Image: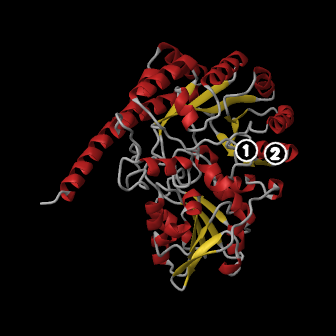
């Protein structure tokens, strides 16, 4: 078994995009998700180490010092971070040429040949669900015998047969021991979750058909495959004992509530443990189910509302209507369940009027907190193919979703609505939502209840307004770059 390092490389300042983050861009406030997609294969490989550089403030020099001791390095990459990750891989090869380097993640799964061609430092790429692929490579099996692998042979890219998606997730070892061994959990922050928090998957895949969602279309699949309720409960009991300081456990399944019968079974087993937990959910649960989850320890739902326009919801195949969202939200308010809502600007086909509808819809819902993102058409998604077919990409290089410093510009634009208007609308959305009496009073209330929350909210407020100012500077810089590019491309 080769000594193997599972690596989330140093990246842009404030960027959380290579280790499983859903919204791969620089954050408004300090936010780091757990690198669970790397922790799982690390749990399969004895003697391995998981190194998550961004939250641990490990720069390139520190990363290289650690990587020097490993024969094999597996890097989790993403579309925005690929160029950066290639530079790290090349530096690892330069200091120790015999190190074998593999790339995994959604981008590698969809574009294996292109990923291999991105750098000569990359020896192999793991496609789709890569847990056992990584294990078999670490076992030093011949590359041509490993399913789900792409690699070079005699200068040509070779794609081995696909690896079947796992059907029994209970066979996977828990990631809790990897977290304990390799991570400082206090370094992981999510603004709407209690700190410190712990994030786990109880299942993979999602049956929803959302056109923009990355993971179901690239790695995890459309079928929701789950761990049994008792296995989840046992893992949570172990997690509570291992990390007594954790205040909240988050189930990061794409849609934890996709299989309600099983979700209720899990919740029933969590109740006696006395845990505070939260999860991703669609806005389509009835009030009785919501109250049942609440009684079993649920504190918060993370819900993708996406848009306040019915036609856009149909265009992205959301499968939930505005009325259903309103009923769900009202039921959560009555039951005392907190909601963090996510919205996306720039989905097809956005207009100035639909942006206004979405802002007003969010205000009417009056969620505890929300996140506003720019539509990111990642390769492998239906949204990406639609954008290519309809000419919605605002730039020639459709793969460059972020700039080399982590700045995310609007990738799409539509007739009558420029990418700059979509980009600017994000700040307008935030200001019009949060700078109202009710959200301000809610935030102040949480600050007065807990001294640590008070300090945290002050920090987050400073980070947020600094991020908004930085966005304006970045947009101006982007305009300057584009003007220069246009000038250079004009014929004399």
What is the number of callouts on the image? 2
Which residue is labeled 1 in the image?
A: 243
Please identify the quadrant where the N terminus is shown.
Answer: bottom right
62 with respect to 424 (left or right): right
What residue is rendered at 58% in x and 49% in y? 214
Q: Secondary structure at mark 2?
A: helix
Q: Is residue 326 left or right of residue 443?
A: right
Q: Which labelled disc corresponds to residue 232?
A: 2
The x, y position of residue 60, in whole percent, is 46, 63
10 Å crowding of disc 2: few (<14), some (14-19), many (20+): many
Q: Which residue appears at 47% of the width and 48% of the height?
A: 15
Classify 312 as above or below 401. Answer: above
Nearest the viewer among 445 and 144 is 144
In this view, the residue in front, 45 or 363, is 363
The residue under the point 48% across, 13% down is: 437
Disc assigned to residue 132: none
Q: Are marks 2 and 1 in contact (CB under 8 Å)?
A: no
Outermost residue toward the front in this view: 389
Q: Where is residue 385 drawn, in percent x and y? A: 51, 51
Q: Which tag, 2 or 1, sits closer to the chain's start?
A: 2
- Which mark lies nearer to you, 2 or 1? 2
Q: Residue at x 55, y 49 (%)?
A: 382
Residue 70, position as x, y percentages in the image = 60, 73
Quadrant assignment, res 350? top left
Residue 12 locus on image (x, y percent):
43, 52
Element on which disc 1 rests? loop
**Position above or below: 458 against 3:** above
């Amino acid at each position: 078994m080769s000594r193997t390092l599972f690596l989330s490389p140093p990246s842009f300042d404030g960027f959380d995009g290579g280790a499983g983050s859903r919204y791969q861009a620089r954050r408004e406030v300090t936010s780091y998700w757990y690198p669970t997609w790397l922790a799982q294969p690390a749990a399969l490989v004895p003697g391995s180490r998981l190194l998550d550089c961004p939250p641990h403030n490990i720069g390139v020099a520190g990363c290289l010092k650690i990587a020097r001791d490993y024969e094999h390095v597996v890097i989790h990459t993403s579309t925005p971070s690929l160029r950066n990750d290639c530079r790290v891989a090349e530096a690892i090869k330069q200091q120790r040429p015999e190190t074998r380097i593999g790339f995994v993640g959604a981008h590698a799964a969809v574009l294996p040949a292109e990923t291999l061609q991105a750098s000569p430092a990359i020896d192999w790429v793991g496609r789709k669900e890569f847990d056992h692929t990584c294990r078999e490579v670490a076992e030093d099996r011949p590359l041509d015998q490993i399913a789900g692998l792409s690699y070079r042979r005699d200068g040509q890219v070779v794609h081995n047969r696909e690896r079947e998606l796992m059907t029994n997730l209970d066979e996977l070892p828990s990631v809790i021991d990897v977290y304990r061994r390799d991570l400082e959990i206090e370094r992981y922050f999510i603004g709407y979750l209690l700190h410190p928090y712990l994030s786990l998957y109880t299942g993979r895949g999602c049956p929803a058909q959302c056109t923009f969602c990355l993971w179901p279309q690239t790695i995890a699949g459309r079928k929701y495959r789950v761990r049994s309720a008792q296995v989840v409960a046992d893992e949570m009991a172990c997690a509570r004992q291992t990390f007594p300081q954790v205040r909240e456990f988050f189930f990061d399944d794409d849609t934890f509530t996709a299989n309600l019968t099983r979700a209720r079974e899990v919740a029933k087993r969590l109740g006696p443990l006395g845990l505070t937990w939260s999860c991703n959910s669609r806005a389509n649960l009835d009030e009785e189910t919501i109250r049942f989850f609440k009684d079993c320890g649920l504190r918060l739902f993370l819900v993708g509302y996406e848009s306040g326009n019915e036609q856009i919801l149909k265009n992205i195949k959301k499968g939930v209507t505005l009325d259903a969202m309103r009923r769900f939200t009202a039921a959560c308010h009555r039951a005392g369940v907190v909601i963090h809502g996510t919205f996306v600007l720039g989905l097809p086909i956005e207009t100035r009027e639909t942006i206004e509808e979405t802002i007003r819809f969010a205000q009417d819902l009056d969620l505890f907190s929300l996140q506003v993102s720019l539509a990111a058409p990642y390769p492998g998604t239906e949204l990406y193919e639609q954008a290519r077919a309809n000419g919605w990409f605002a730039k020639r290089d459709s793969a460059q979703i972020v700039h080399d410093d982590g700045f995310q510009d609007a990738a799409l634009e539509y007739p009558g609505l420029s990418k700059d208007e979509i980009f600017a609308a994000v700040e307008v959305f935030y200001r019009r939502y949060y700078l109202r009496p009710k959200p301000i009073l809610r935030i102040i209330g949480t600050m007065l209840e807990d001294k640590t929350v008070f300090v945290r909210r002050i920090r987050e407020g400073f980070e947020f307004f600094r991020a908004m100012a930085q966005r304006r500077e970045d947009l101006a810089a982007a305009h300057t770059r584009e003007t220069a590019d246009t000038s250079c491309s004009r014929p004399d």
